[in-house]
Image (cartoon, grey):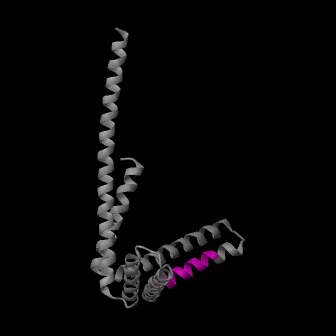
Amino acid sequence: MNKNINKFILIPLINLIIGILIIIFKGEVIRWCAIAFGVLLTAQGIISLVSDAKKKSNQNNIITFDILMIVFGVLLIVFAGFVTTVIRVLFGIVFILYGVLKLMAISNDKDNKSALLFVFESVLLIIIGVLVFMDNKIIYIFIGTLLIIDSIIGFINYFNKNKNKKKKDVIDAEIKVINEEVSEWKNY
């Protein structure tokens, strides 16, 4: 398989796995991601600090950055629950504000023929924001389901693309055979 095929199948596969994990473990997945990111930051900071020490680099800003990566990584690991809560609250606020702003924009546009659809979307955004803000487990099921649906669509697109590519290859081969036969007839 070439790199493009791997990329096109890998993204839906990752979405499927994350979607299933979110549905099963709900908010814990976000905390795990915060911890994993903290571990990665800490490891990268330590590796960079050791590398800079071996080079005997006298650039204070590089060493300071390495130390800050380590500190930030450790803080993410230690306070993963707090970070998860902050992220959840911020996402809730963003959804609520986005829904309210869309409602305000719709109320100013009297000529909008699909206003009902936009009102529905705005109210849905506000509801999602409230559910995220309140840490309602339903929202995790909703997000996980959306990721699974997105992965299924990705798989379907991948397989349809490959099927269409095979059809194109067959058509190209048939055209080549026809062109060769026509060339042979011209030689007679």
Percent position of residue 97, x then y: 48, 85
Please indicate whether residue 6 sits to the left or right of residue 69 in the image.
left
Percent position of residue 37, x then y: 47, 75
In the image, 52 versus 132, the foreground residue is 132
Question: Taking 174 as reference, is 13 above or below it?
Answer: below
In the image, 49 versus 137, the foreground residue is 137
- The outermost residue toward the top is 188
* Quadrant of image for the C terminus: top left
Residue drawn where x is 30% and y is 35% of the image: 170
Find the magenta span and give its range: 65-78
Question: Taking 50 as reference, is 108 above or below it?
Answer: below
- The outermost residue toward the left is 24
**174 falls in the magenta region:** no
Determine which quarter of the picture holds residue 137. Answer: bottom left
Helix, strand or loop: magenta stretch = helix
- The outermost residue toward the front is 111
Please indicate whether residue 45 sits to the left or right of residue 179 in the image.
right
In the image, 36 versus 43, the foreground residue is 36
Question: Taking 55 as reference, is 112 above or below it?
Answer: below
Residue drawn where x is 33% and y is 70% of the image: 147
Residue drawn where x is 48% and y is 73% of the image: 40
- The outermost residue toward the bottom is 134
Percent position of residue 29, x then y: 36, 79
Residue drawn where x is 34% and y is 18% of the image: 182
Percent position of residue 122, x then y: 41, 81
